[in-house]
Image (cartoon, rainbow, N blue to C red):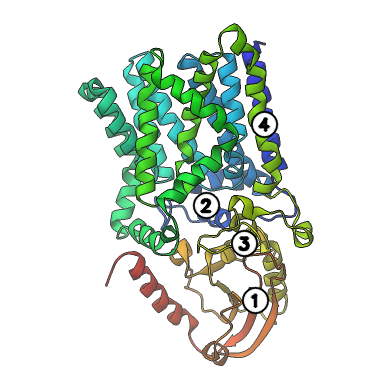
Amino acid sequence: MKKESILLSLFILAKFALQYLAVHPDYDLQRDEFLHLDQAKHLAWGYLSVPPFTSWNSVLIYWLGGGEFWVRFFPTFYGVLTLVLMWDLVKRLGGGLFAQSLSAIFLLCSAMIRLNLLYQPNSVDILCWTLVIYTVARWEKEPNPKWLYFLGASLGIGMLNKYSIAFLGIGVLLSLLLFRPRLFRKKHFYGGLGLALLLFLPNLIWQITHGFPVLTHMRLLTQYQLVNNSAGGFLMEQALFTYPSLLLLIPGLITVWFSSWGKPHRWIIVAYGLTLTILAFFQAKGYYALGLYPAIMGLGAIGVEKSTRFSFGSKLRPVALALPIILFLPAFNLIHPTVGPEKILVSPPNYAKLGLNRWEDGKEYPLPQDFADMLGWSELGSLVDQAIAQIPDQGRVLVLCGNYGQAGAINFYAKTPGLEAFTMNADYLYWFDLDEPIKHLILVRIAEEPLTEREIGFFETHTTIGKISHPLAREAGTTVYLLLNAKGDINEILRNEIIEEKALWEGKP
């Protein structure tokens, strides 16, 4: 086996090992993961917040058994594919084994580990962003039209996974217009863009027929989450995401920019800068830009390799390989959920040092939001099972939750056969089955929203089953109520509420 293959295999093994070491076994899945898993049971060409690609992946997860192992496996797998793609990109751009190894270390010692922990569209998003730059670079080396169609496929599949790849598309096209105007005279370039549109078309049609709910989703993001972001904060996060490699990455990129051999690759650096500027202007979340870094890290690693090719510089190469690891290891437990929740209760790591305990609402909490969103869910599933056990007859039971995290967690962790929880929140709005009359209701409410007198009066009896008890859980205090024997038609009430909620998402008056 070639030395290159051996080294790549070792980096792949390191990637898998780090991903599984980065999550303590006491943590549950994260709330967004449950939604994506439930989408597999309701396949469509689109959803309120995301395109359909992740739902297809969820079908595969259920075919494989549907356990937590496979849920964690796929984001890791896509992270490995990104590493392999970057490895080959470095080689195609003129890098040797040292540059390939250094770029792999850059990638491993970055925020990619944390991002690849969660089963969300982000891991595939980064892979597709890297593919876009990779296919353009391959076309430059060998101007075969197939690479322009691969470029279109990368953009099209990327749009079926997450719409944010459109920002990269704008940045790359502007950069190519500056540095590769001849590309815009190639008919196959437009053929590739046509392929991208063709692949994306089913989701676009879905958006049109549903009143473009993505616009509502963006408005809600801007109103409740992105409003707490700033361009300065966005750029600061970029430094935090890549800080172990910055001391080498920045000089490496400067070397690329000012060297004659690096001139053909300047378009990648400009595309990075343009895309980053666009994202900062729209006050995007910092991690939206992570897809830029595999190519930039690879290019920076080539710059370091070229600048250390002389006798004295070559002696510094072992130091360069070790430096990102040395800087990354002390923070590994700080930026990943490696410490068990019980230990955190006694001696919490100082997340505030890196600003990690600032949530979407702009406030600071004892635990990073992603970690807090991985606690209490299995307990919630058990509480619903307890509620089901107390129902005296076989009348239809509806589990109605306040948000998609609750509904998805119950569907994943509850043991009752055939049970399916719903909510008026997110895509569950379209999944209600109201054909059979509902007799009993299990309500799941956050601590701040107890039962109302109207709800209590609609049933003969009501019981409080229990609440999520873990104090660090984002859903701490979320309570399960059992309401037995409805006095009226619940189905009709729910139908009217669903119509009103759908109208809000679909932009109808």
Question: Which residue in the structure is indicated by mark 3?
Answer: 409
Q: Is residue 469 shown left or right of residue 230?
A: right
Q: Is residue 357 above or below residue 203?
A: below
Find the distance from the CA under tag 4 to the CA under tag 1.
Answer: 44 Å
Query: Is 2 rendered above or below residue 159?
Result: above
The amino acid type found where label 2 is placed reads Ala
Residue depth check, mark 3 versus mark 4: number of the one nearer the observer = 4
According to the picture, the residue beneath numbered tag 1 turns out to be 479
* Label 4 sits on residue: 325
**Label 3 – label 2 distance at C-alpha:** 15 Å
Mark 3 or mark 1: whose residue is earlier in sequence: 3
441 on left or right of 91:
right
Examine the rendering and report whether any part of residue 153 can be seen: yes
Residue under numbered circle 2: 40
Labels 4 and 1: the sequence-earlier one = 4
Are dots 3 and 2 in contact, CB under 8 Å?
no
Other residues around mark 4 within 10 Å, as few (<14) / some (14–19) / many (≥20) = some
Where is residue 479 drawn, in percent x and y? 64, 76
Numbered label attached to residue 330 = none
| Residue 499 picture quarter | bottom left
Query: What amino acid is found at the position of numbered circle 1 in the picture?
Result: Thr
